[in-house]
Amino acid sequence: MKTRWILKSLILLVISFVTNIGLRESLPAAEHLNVLFFLVDDLRPELGCYGNQHVKTPNIDALAKAGVRFERAYCQFPLCNPSRSSMLTGRHPPVTGVLDNSTWFGATHPDFVSLPRHFKDNGYSVLRTGKVFHGGIDDADAWTEGGEKRTFEGAISNRKPPVNQKQNSDRIVVLDGDGESHQDYKTAIRAIDYLRRHSDSSSGKPFFLCCGFTKPHSPPTAPKRFIDMYDLKSVPLPPDFQPRPTVPEGFPKPSLNARNGDLFVERDASPDEAREMIRAYWASLTWTDWNLGRVMAELDTLKLREKTIIVFWGDHGYHLGEKGKWSKHGSLWEIGTRVPLIVIDPKAKGNGSSSPRPVQSLDLYPTLCELCGLSTPSGLAGHSLKPLLANPRAEWSHPAFTVFGNAKGVSGVAVRTQRYRYVEYDGGKSGTMLFDEQADPHELKNLADNPNLADNPNLADDPNLADDPNLAAIKTELSKLAKQHAGVR
Ligand SMILES: [Ca+2]
């Protein structure tokens, strides 16, 4: 009898060891929180919780009420693959080497452990549904479920864009019913299935679930009832609207690409067409909000809120006709680089408020490691946001950096402090931009080339800058930061 009891105890011990072997950290398994990470494609902070009075986003607004909303969050590159590769490896784009939509970071840097891979290595069930890495360039081995084989071998995709991409992107898609036929509807279904199957924490394996919606990326897409929510006549145009991308007088030529990437490609946008496209973008993001709401309802049904960190993130900014530009390609303006970011740590003291500090997408990797009690891999460039989750106005000395370029290298660097945005093209040789975002939120006035800059006293209390005596000194300090960042490798 005693032998049988010892044998049973030994078997239980072995089962327990095998179950928890992946959780290498010191915390017991039950104390590791789950992660539910929403990634939304091409969503600028066009949301109720970011002050937009027109759009209907009740489910995302509810996330903002429950967590900390970051008022000034910035992507590292205004394009899908470089932005996502940066956030998911915790490194700046010049370090990942991903500066286009064709490059796979892992071929050149097999030593970089991606965010989902790190959670997998630490014993989490790591689950993917929808777009997380860029399409066809998945870190396939990072997931315990949902990984997809990359569509090419080596570092660079040889896939050519379809010949009719321009026409496909530049249109409005109306779905039947609730949109059941669309990928994003199915992405939510799969997330709900994952939650049901992985909700039992007694298994000793918490989950890290990434749920990536492809809308409102072009073509704007929604069931009809979401389009009908908006009255076309009430859609405002931006104050700097133009029919085509137009570099304003006094601004550097590289600040706007003459050719739009996704919408109104090589054609004018009339004011009426622009209103219709903005309405379609709103409908598309309201449908995304609805899909997100379905996943959140399941999380609540399963009573997982208290055990789950929730992140809501957009991959880069987006123009809707500002300065005649549509979509994101190459924009280092505020509207091209600012992203929505909400983090809910169920225990955080700052929940329900917003943080004015400039933060970056690549801060998420170290943040999630710290909140979940995992070690942080070496080589990450970001800073954990945990102090700002506790106190959204805590001291924060880090500015945000965004770059643009291509396979040949970086051509533009933007630095964002709490108050200022500064941009240098080709190290300043192709022009510079300086904005006081508090005085000029639409970026209509380029201060950089003002010969009387030294006459303007620095009245701002910007926690990211030294106590510079005037705007000329601020420009000098920001230029130094931009040049340092251009040299990051
Ligand atoms: Ca995108």
Image: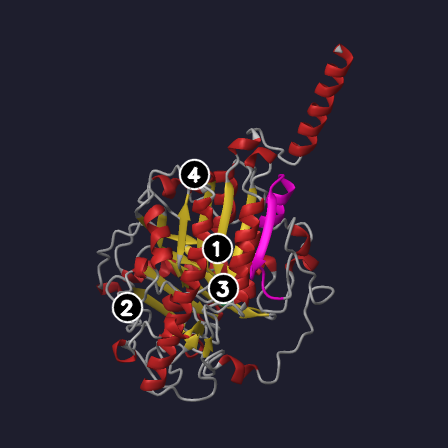
Picture disc at residue 54: 2
Q: Amino acid at mark 3?
A: Phe
The crowding category of the residue bearing disc 2, from other C-alpha atoms within 10 Å (few below 14, some 14 to 19, many at least 20), is some
Q: Residue at x 78, y 13 (%)?
A: 3
Residue 317 showing in the rendered view: no
Q: Amino acid at mark 1?
A: Phe
Residues at discs 4 and 1 in contact (Cβ within 8 Å): no
Q: Residue at x 57, y 57 (%)?
A: 129
Q: Earlier in the sequence, mark 4 or mark 1?
A: 1
Task: Tell me where residue 385 sits by quadrant.
Answer: top left
Quarter of the image for the N terminus: give it.
top right
Residues at discs 1 and 3 in contact (Cβ within 8 Å): no
Q: Nearer the viewer, mark 4 or mark 1?
A: 4
Judged from the image, the secondary structure of the residue bearing numbered disc 3 is loop
Q: Amino acid at mark 2?
A: His
Q: Which residue is mark 3?
A: 77
Distance CA(mark 3)–CA(mark 4):
33 Å
Q: Earlier in the sequence, mark 4 or mark 2?
A: 2
Q: Which residue is mark 1?
A: 38
Distance CA(mark 1)–CA(mark 3):
19 Å
Distance CA(mark 4)–CA(mark 1):
17 Å
The stretch in magenta equals 115-135
The crowding category of the residue bearing disc 1, from other C-alpha atoms within 10 Å (few below 14, some 14 to 19, many at least 20), is many
Q: Amino acid at mark 4?
A: Glu
Q: How is the image coloured?
A: secondary structure
Judged from the image, the secondary structure of the residue bearing numbered disc 1 is strand
Let me know if residue 123 is in the magenta part.
yes
Q: Which residue is mark 4?
A: 306
Judged from the image, the secondary structure of the residue bearing numbered disc 2 is loop
